[in-house]
Amino acid sequence: MTESAKEQARMLVDKLGLKGPPVPVEKLAKALGVRIEYTPFDDELSGMAFLRDGKPIIGVNSKHHPNRQRFTIAHELGHIVLHRSHLETAVLIDKSKNFIARDPTSAQGIDPLEIQANAFASELLLPARMVRQVLSESAGDLHDDDYLIRVAQRFRVSLTAFQIRLEQI
């Protein structure tokens, strides 16, 4: 289930022809015809993916840290790439928007769509090949927080996100 999501993310990164981090998620969204709108949501809401007149839109909480915003964009891109049919059949919120919202329930990690979108986002922001490449080039101590922070900053992700990714590859 998550392997397919990761493969989709790898294909997008490969299409960009990137040599190193960070992955430009906003540029990727634009290339996929996705518009990003930054809005000051309540703190619990990181973002949402929805369709407006058939066009995909990602709403991002403008009050969140830029690293969190990058993850939200990557996660919502996952929904757009992997779950477009769900967006097209979602409950109509108003006359112009269908959406899948990110909220505390979706963040619990039990919904299969959320698990897939998280796997997609993780692979998109921290492609395994790039992580291995950066670690081999910089040859630091993986138990040294300062080293891990520097590497996480290269990818423009949080230390926590980077540590979780390291456990996966």
Image: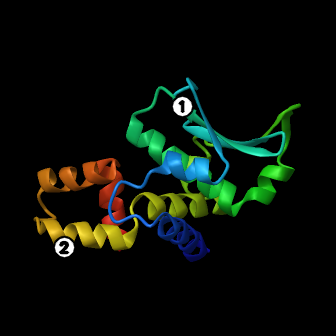
Amino acid found under the numbered disc labelled 2: Ser
Element type at mark 1: strand
Which quarter of the image is occupied by the C terminus? bottom left
Which residue shows up at 15% across the image and 53% down it?
145
Question: Would you call the spot at circle 1 few (<14 residues within 10 Å), some (14-19), or many (20 or more)?
Answer: many
* Residue nearest the viewer, comparing 52 with 114: 52
Which residue shows up at 12% across the image and 69% down it?
139
Element type at mark 2: helix
Residue 122, by quadrant, is: bottom left
The Cα–Cα distance between marks 1 and 2, rounded to whole angstroms, is 35 Å
Which residue shows up at 36% across the image and 64% down it?
165
Q: Is residue 141 visible?
A: yes
Amino acid found under the numbered disc labelled 1: Asn
Residue 95, by quadrant, is: top right
Label 2 belongs to which residue? 136
Do the CB atoms of the residues marked 1 and 2 lie less than 8 Å apart? no
